[in-house]
Image: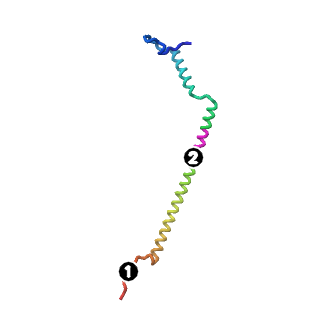
Amino acid sequence: MDNIALSSDSDAGECNPAPSQSTVDKENVKNMAFSSSTISLDPDSNLDDDEEKQRLISQVLELQNTLDDLSSRVDSVKVENLKLKSENQVLGQYIENLMAASSVFQSATPKTKKK
């Protein structure tokens, strides 16, 4: 097994030669081992991740369904609103016609009396 020289192992006046290819490969293996130690290989952890994914997927699907329901409701309310506006215009015109035909709502201009 080769020993890897550390900067703290050398004397202050010594220069270390450039690392050999095998030294570099060993450093890469150490770095990969360190980085892979942060990844959990515990099967319970994978189950938790799968459960979390399933929970999130079901939540997204539920939110999509809610959005679809709300969009449908908005569309039906828009249609109902247009229908009510149309009916209000018809009723407004009907009321105006009734008021014009009735003597009660005629302008109050004084009539001149004939002598």
Give the main secondary structure of the magenta stretch. helix
For the magenta stretch, what is the residue range?
53-65
- The residue carrying pointer 2 sits among few (fewer than 14), some (14 to 19) or many (20 or more) residues within 10 Å by Cα, namely few
Q: Position of residue 23 (x, y in %)?
A: 52, 15
Q: Nearer the viewer, residue 40 or 19?
A: 40
Disc 2 element: helix
Residue in view at x 57 percent, y 51 percent: 69
Tag of residue 2: none
Magenta-colored stretch includes residue 104: no
Position above or below: 77 against 53: below
Disc 1 element: loop
Residue in view at x 46 percent, y 74 percent: 99
Position above or below: 43 against 16: below
**Colour setup of the view:** rainbow
Q: Position of residue 16 (x, y in %)?
A: 46, 12
Q: Nearer the viewer, mark 2 or mark 1?
A: 1
- Type of amino acid at the residue the image marks with label 1: Pro
Residue in view at x 56 percent, y 23 percent: 33
Position above or below: 91 against 104: above
Labels 2 & 1 near each other (Cβ < 8 A): no
Q: Which residue is mark 2?
A: 64
Q: Which residue is mark 1?
A: 110
Indicate left or right for 34 with 18 as reference: right
Q: Nearer the viewer, residue 3 or 94?
A: 3
Alpha-carbon span between mark 2 and mark 1: 69 Å
- Type of amino acid at the residue the image marks with label 2: Gln
Position above or below: 42 against 27: below
Q: Quadrant of the N terminus?
A: top right
